[in-house]
Image (cartoon, coloured by chain):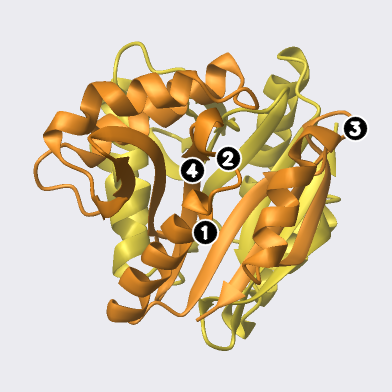
Chain colours: A orange, B yellow
Amino acid sequence: MDIRPIEEKDRAPIAALIRKIETFSPQEVEVAIELANTTLTPGNTDYAIIVADRDGELVGYICYGPTPMTEDTYDLYWIASAPEVRGQGVGAALVSAMEGDLRRRNGRLIRVETSATEAYGPTRGFYASMKYGEEARIRDFYKVGDDLIILTKRL
Amino acid sequence: MDIRPIEEKDRAPIAALIRKIETFSPQEVEVAIELANTTLTPGNTDYAIIVADRDGELVGYICYGPTPMTEDTYDLYWIASAPEVRGQGVGAALVSAMEGDLRRRNGRLIRVETSATEAYGPTRGFYASMKYGEEARIRDFYKVGDDLIILTKRL
Protein backbone atom coordinates (compact mmCIF):
# COMPACT_ATOMS: atom_id res chain seq x y z
CA MET A 1 0.00 0.00 0.00
CA ASP A 2 1.21 3.44 -0.90
CA ILE A 3 0.63 6.28 1.61
CA ARG A 4 1.20 9.52 -0.32
CA PRO A 5 0.06 13.14 -0.70
CA ILE A 6 -3.06 13.72 -2.79
CA GLU A 7 -2.66 14.29 -6.53
CA GLU A 8 -4.99 15.77 -9.13
CA LYS A 9 -5.85 12.27 -10.42
CA ASP A 10 -7.38 11.47 -6.99
CA ARG A 11 -10.16 14.08 -7.33
CA ALA A 12 -12.90 11.75 -8.59
CA PRO A 13 -11.80 8.65 -6.60
CA ILE A 14 -11.80 10.63 -3.34
CA ALA A 15 -15.34 11.88 -3.95
CA ALA A 16 -16.42 8.30 -4.71
CA LEU A 17 -14.75 7.08 -1.48
CA ILE A 18 -16.43 9.79 0.62
CA ARG A 19 -19.83 8.80 -0.80
CA LYS A 20 -19.24 5.20 0.42
CA ILE A 21 -18.76 6.14 4.10
CA GLU A 22 -21.91 5.05 5.94
CA THR A 23 -21.45 7.30 9.00
CA PHE A 24 -21.32 10.52 6.89
CA SER A 25 -24.61 12.40 6.50
CA PRO A 26 -25.41 13.94 3.06
CA GLN A 27 -24.26 17.33 4.42
CA GLU A 28 -21.01 15.84 5.71
CA VAL A 29 -20.41 14.18 2.32
CA GLU A 30 -20.86 17.57 0.65
CA VAL A 31 -18.49 19.38 3.05
CA ALA A 32 -15.84 16.64 2.84
CA ILE A 33 -15.85 16.67 -0.98
CA GLU A 34 -15.69 20.48 -1.02
CA LEU A 35 -12.67 20.37 1.31
CA ALA A 36 -10.91 17.84 -0.92
CA ASN A 37 -11.49 20.09 -3.92
CA THR A 38 -10.18 23.11 -1.97
CA THR A 39 -7.07 21.11 -1.06
CA LEU A 40 -6.41 20.53 -4.77
CA THR A 41 -6.67 24.26 -5.57
CA PRO A 42 -3.25 25.67 -6.56
CA GLY A 43 -1.69 27.78 -3.79
CA ASN A 44 -3.74 26.16 -1.01
CA THR A 45 -1.88 25.96 2.32
CA ASP A 46 -4.93 25.69 4.62
CA TYR A 47 -5.54 21.98 4.03
CA ALA A 48 -3.45 18.88 3.35
CA ILE A 49 -4.58 15.41 2.31
CA ILE A 50 -2.71 12.11 2.46
CA VAL A 51 -4.24 9.13 0.67
CA ALA A 52 -3.90 5.35 0.94
CA ASP A 53 -3.48 3.88 -2.52
CA ARG A 54 -3.68 0.07 -2.88
CA ASP A 55 -2.66 -1.11 -6.34
CA GLY A 56 -4.03 2.08 -7.89
CA GLU A 57 -7.25 2.02 -5.90
CA LEU A 58 -7.84 4.83 -3.41
CA VAL A 59 -8.91 3.10 -0.18
CA GLY A 60 -8.53 5.84 2.43
CA TYR A 61 -7.64 9.46 3.09
CA ILE A 62 -6.95 11.93 5.86
CA CYS A 63 -7.53 15.70 5.62
CA TYR A 64 -5.93 18.11 8.10
CA GLY A 65 -4.48 21.59 8.32
CA PRO A 66 -3.20 24.42 10.51
CA THR A 67 -5.85 25.79 12.89
CA PRO A 68 -6.35 29.47 11.98
CA MET A 69 -5.05 32.03 14.50
CA THR A 70 -3.07 29.50 16.52
CA GLU A 71 0.64 28.78 16.87
CA ASP A 72 1.44 25.22 15.73
CA THR A 73 -2.03 23.76 16.40
CA TYR A 74 -3.60 21.59 13.70
CA ASP A 75 -7.07 20.23 13.04
CA LEU A 76 -7.70 16.72 11.77
CA TYR A 77 -10.79 17.46 9.68
CA TRP A 78 -11.66 14.15 8.01
CA ILE A 79 -10.46 10.59 7.92
CA ALA A 80 -12.08 7.70 6.13
CA SER A 81 -11.24 4.28 4.81
CA ALA A 82 -13.19 2.17 2.37
CA PRO A 83 -15.48 -0.47 3.94
CA GLU A 84 -13.55 -3.28 2.20
CA VAL A 85 -10.24 -2.47 3.96
CA ARG A 86 -11.52 -1.92 7.50
CA GLY A 87 -9.42 -3.61 10.20
CA GLN A 88 -6.32 -3.65 7.99
CA GLY A 89 -4.59 -0.69 9.61
CA VAL A 90 -5.28 1.83 6.86
CA GLY A 91 -6.58 4.46 9.32
CA ALA A 92 -3.61 4.00 11.65
CA ALA A 93 -1.19 4.33 8.72
CA LEU A 94 -2.88 7.57 7.64
CA VAL A 95 -2.85 9.08 11.15
CA SER A 96 0.83 8.13 11.57
CA ALA A 97 1.68 9.72 8.22
CA MET A 98 -0.15 12.92 9.22
CA GLU A 99 1.66 13.02 12.57
CA GLY A 100 4.99 12.57 10.80
CA ASP A 101 4.18 15.47 8.50
CA LEU A 102 3.09 17.65 11.44
CA ARG A 103 6.25 16.86 13.44
CA ARG A 104 8.29 18.02 10.45
CA ARG A 105 6.25 21.26 10.45
CA ASN A 106 6.86 21.69 14.23
CA GLY A 107 3.20 20.95 14.98
CA ARG A 108 2.49 20.97 18.69
CA LEU A 109 -1.16 20.07 19.22
CA ILE A 110 -3.68 18.13 17.12
CA ARG A 111 -7.42 18.60 17.63
CA VAL A 112 -10.17 16.26 16.40
CA GLU A 113 -13.89 16.83 16.75
CA THR A 114 -16.20 13.84 16.84
CA SER A 115 -19.65 12.79 17.91
CA ALA A 116 -20.61 11.13 21.20
CA THR A 117 -23.28 8.96 19.56
CA GLU A 118 -23.17 5.18 19.44
CA ALA A 119 -22.54 5.17 15.69
CA TYR A 120 -19.20 6.86 16.38
CA GLY A 121 -18.15 4.33 19.05
CA PRO A 122 -15.67 2.57 16.70
CA THR A 123 -14.30 5.98 15.65
CA ARG A 124 -13.71 6.96 19.28
CA GLY A 125 -12.08 3.58 19.95
CA PHE A 126 -9.80 4.11 16.98
CA TYR A 127 -8.70 7.54 18.20
CA ALA A 128 -8.14 6.20 21.73
CA SER A 129 -5.87 3.50 20.27
CA MET A 130 -3.90 6.30 18.53
CA LYS A 131 -3.53 8.15 21.88
CA TYR A 132 -6.05 10.92 21.21
CA GLY A 133 -7.70 11.80 24.53
CA GLU A 134 -10.98 13.55 25.30
CA GLU A 135 -10.24 17.11 26.37
CA ALA A 136 -13.63 18.84 26.09
CA ARG A 137 -17.29 18.21 25.34
CA ILE A 138 -20.25 20.38 24.28
CA ARG A 139 -23.63 18.93 25.15
CA ASP A 140 -26.27 18.71 22.39
CA PHE A 141 -23.91 20.30 19.88
CA TYR A 142 -24.74 18.43 16.67
CA LYS A 143 -28.37 18.08 17.71
CA VAL A 144 -30.29 17.40 20.90
CA GLY A 145 -28.75 14.25 22.42
CA ASP A 146 -25.67 14.36 20.18
CA ASP A 147 -22.68 15.87 21.99
CA LEU A 148 -19.48 17.15 20.44
CA ILE A 149 -16.35 15.51 21.82
CA ILE A 150 -13.03 17.28 21.29
CA LEU A 151 -10.02 14.98 21.32
CA THR A 152 -6.45 16.21 21.40
CA LYS A 153 -2.95 14.80 21.08
CA ARG A 154 0.29 16.60 21.96
CA LEU A 155 3.17 15.87 19.58
CA MET B 1 -28.13 54.36 17.51
CA ASP B 2 -29.26 52.13 14.68
CA ILE B 3 -28.74 48.35 15.00
CA ARG B 4 -29.22 46.93 11.50
CA PRO B 5 -28.01 44.24 9.07
CA ILE B 6 -24.81 45.01 7.17
CA GLU B 7 -25.09 46.80 3.81
CA GLU B 8 -22.64 47.14 0.94
CA LYS B 9 -21.76 50.72 2.02
CA ASP B 10 -20.38 49.28 5.31
CA ARG B 11 -17.57 47.37 3.58
CA ALA B 12 -14.79 49.96 4.06
CA PRO B 13 -16.00 51.26 7.47
CA ILE B 14 -16.10 47.72 8.89
CA ALA B 15 -12.53 47.04 7.77
CA ALA B 16 -11.47 50.36 9.36
CA LEU B 17 -13.26 49.41 12.60
CA ILE B 18 -11.64 45.97 12.71
CA ARG B 19 -8.18 47.57 12.31
CA LYS B 20 -8.85 49.71 15.40
CA ILE B 21 -9.46 46.75 17.76
CA GLU B 22 -6.39 46.49 19.99
CA THR B 23 -6.92 42.86 21.09
CA PHE B 24 -6.95 41.56 17.47
CA SER B 25 -3.64 40.24 16.14
CA PRO B 26 -2.70 41.04 12.51
CA GLN B 27 -3.84 37.54 11.54
CA GLU B 28 -7.16 38.01 13.34
CA VAL B 29 -7.66 41.37 11.58
CA GLU B 30 -7.12 39.64 8.25
CA VAL B 31 -9.53 36.80 8.99
CA ALA B 32 -12.21 39.15 10.38
CA ILE B 33 -12.06 41.42 7.29
CA GLU B 34 -12.18 38.38 4.99
CA LEU B 35 -15.27 37.12 6.80
CA ALA B 36 -16.99 40.52 6.47
CA ASN B 37 -16.28 40.49 2.74
CA THR B 38 -17.62 36.93 2.46
CA THR B 39 -20.78 38.02 4.26
CA LEU B 40 -21.32 40.72 1.62
CA THR B 41 -20.99 38.19 -1.22
CA PRO B 42 -24.35 37.70 -2.98
CA GLY B 43 -25.97 34.38 -2.09
CA ASN B 44 -24.06 33.99 1.18
CA THR B 45 -26.02 32.17 3.89
CA ASP B 46 -23.06 30.96 5.99
CA TYR B 47 -22.47 34.28 7.75
CA ALA B 48 -24.57 37.18 9.02
CA ILE B 49 -23.45 40.58 10.28
CA ILE B 50 -25.36 43.15 12.32
CA VAL B 51 -23.82 46.60 12.73
CA ALA B 52 -24.21 49.47 15.20
CA ASP B 53 -24.53 52.73 13.28
CA ARG B 54 -24.38 55.98 15.28
CA ASP B 55 -25.28 59.00 13.17
CA GLY B 56 -23.81 57.40 10.08
CA GLU B 57 -20.67 56.20 11.82
CA LEU B 58 -20.12 52.44 12.14
CA VAL B 59 -19.18 51.88 15.81
CA GLY B 60 -19.63 48.12 16.26
CA TYR B 61 -20.48 44.85 14.58
CA ILE B 62 -21.23 41.21 15.29
CA CYS B 63 -20.61 38.33 12.86
CA TYR B 64 -22.25 34.93 13.35
CA GLY B 65 -23.68 32.02 11.39
CA PRO B 66 -25.00 28.46 11.41
CA THR B 67 -22.43 25.91 12.58
CA PRO B 68 -21.87 23.50 9.67
CA MET B 69 -23.21 19.96 10.11
CA THR B 70 -25.29 20.79 13.18
CA GLU B 71 -29.01 21.21 13.76
CA ASP B 72 -29.81 24.75 14.96
CA THR B 73 -26.39 25.47 16.48
CA TYR B 74 -24.74 28.81 15.66
CA ASP B 75 -21.28 30.26 16.08
CA LEU B 76 -20.64 33.83 17.17
CA TYR B 77 -17.46 34.46 15.17
CA TRP B 78 -16.57 38.09 15.85
CA ILE B 79 -17.83 41.01 17.87
CA ALA B 80 -16.17 44.38 18.21
CA SER B 81 -17.03 47.92 19.18
CA ALA B 82 -15.01 51.09 18.57
CA PRO B 83 -12.81 52.20 21.49
CA GLU B 84 -14.72 55.52 21.70
CA VAL B 85 -18.07 53.84 22.49
CA ARG B 86 -16.90 51.28 25.07
CA GLY B 87 -19.13 51.03 28.15
CA GLN B 88 -22.14 52.41 26.29
CA GLY B 89 -23.91 49.09 25.76
CA VAL B 90 -23.08 48.71 22.07
CA GLY B 91 -21.83 45.13 22.51
CA ALA B 92 -24.89 44.13 24.55
CA ALA B 93 -27.21 45.64 21.91
CA LEU B 94 -25.42 43.67 19.18
CA VAL B 95 -25.57 40.37 21.08
CA SER B 96 -29.27 40.91 21.85
CA ALA B 97 -29.99 41.66 18.19
CA MET B 98 -28.16 38.49 17.14
CA GLU B 99 -30.07 36.41 19.70
CA GLY B 100 -33.35 37.87 18.43
CA ASP B 101 -32.43 36.91 14.89
CA LEU B 102 -31.42 33.38 15.98
CA ARG B 103 -34.66 32.88 17.95
CA ARG B 104 -36.56 33.76 14.76
CA ARG B 105 -34.49 31.14 12.92
CA ASN B 106 -35.22 28.53 15.66
CA GLY B 107 -31.61 28.66 16.84
CA ARG B 108 -31.02 26.40 19.83
CA LEU B 109 -27.40 26.74 20.90
CA ILE B 110 -24.82 29.53 20.46
CA ARG B 111 -21.10 28.81 20.74
CA VAL B 112 -18.33 31.38 21.24
CA GLU B 113 -14.63 30.67 21.32
CA THR B 114 -12.36 32.98 23.26
CA SER B 115 -8.96 33.13 24.89
CA ALA B 116 -8.13 32.48 28.53
CA THR B 117 -5.42 35.17 28.62
CA GLU B 118 -5.57 38.29 30.78
CA ALA B 119 -6.08 40.56 27.76
CA TYR B 120 -9.41 38.82 27.17
CA GLY B 121 -10.59 39.27 30.79
CA PRO B 122 -13.00 42.10 29.87
CA THR B 123 -14.30 40.03 26.94
CA ARG B 124 -15.00 37.06 29.23
CA GLY B 125 -16.69 39.40 31.74
CA PHE B 126 -18.86 40.77 28.97
CA TYR B 127 -19.98 37.31 27.85
CA ALA B 128 -20.67 36.28 31.46
CA SER B 129 -22.93 39.34 31.82
CA MET B 130 -24.79 38.17 28.70
CA LYS B 131 -25.26 34.67 30.24
CA TYR B 132 -22.71 32.83 28.14
CA GLY B 133 -21.15 30.13 30.35
CA GLU B 134 -17.88 28.23 30.03
CA GLU B 135 -18.61 24.74 28.74
CA ALA B 136 -15.21 23.48 27.60
CA ARG B 137 -11.53 24.38 27.52
CA ILE B 138 -8.52 23.24 25.48
CA ARG B 139 -5.17 23.84 27.15
CA ASP B 140 -2.44 25.63 25.17
CA PHE B 141 -4.69 25.90 22.13
CA TYR B 142 -3.77 29.31 20.69
CA LYS B 143 -0.19 28.93 21.88
CA VAL B 144 1.62 27.54 24.92
CA GLY B 145 -0.01 29.16 27.97
CA ASP B 146 -3.01 30.46 25.98
CA ASP B 147 -6.04 28.20 26.42
CA LEU B 148 -9.17 28.13 24.29
CA ILE B 149 -12.37 28.66 26.26
CA ILE B 150 -15.64 27.58 24.66
CA LEU B 151 -18.68 29.47 25.94
CA THR B 152 -22.24 28.48 25.14
CA LYS B 153 -25.74 29.84 25.62
CA ARG B 154 -28.99 27.91 25.12
CA LEU B 155 -31.80 29.94 23.55
Tell which of B61 and A30 is nearer to you.
Answer: A30
Residue in view at x 61 percent, y 42 percent = B76
> In the rendering, which numbered label is found on residue A78?
4
Which residue type carries mark 2?
A: Arg
* Residue linked to disc 3: A145
Amino acid type, label 1: Ala
- Chain of the residue under label 1: A
Q: Nearer the viewer, mark 2 or mark 1?
A: 2
Q: Which residue is mark 2?
A: A86
Alpha-carbon neighbours of circle 1 within 10 Å: few (<14), some, or many (≥20)?
some
- For the view shown, which residue lies furthest in the bottom direction? B145
Q: Are marks 3 and 2 in contact (CB under 8 Å)?
A: no
> Which is nearer the N-term, disc 4 or disc 2?
4
In space, the residues marked 4 and 2 are separated at their CA atoms by 16 Å
Write down the chain letter for disc 4: A
In terms of sequence position, does the residue under pointer 1 or pointer 4 come before the other?
4
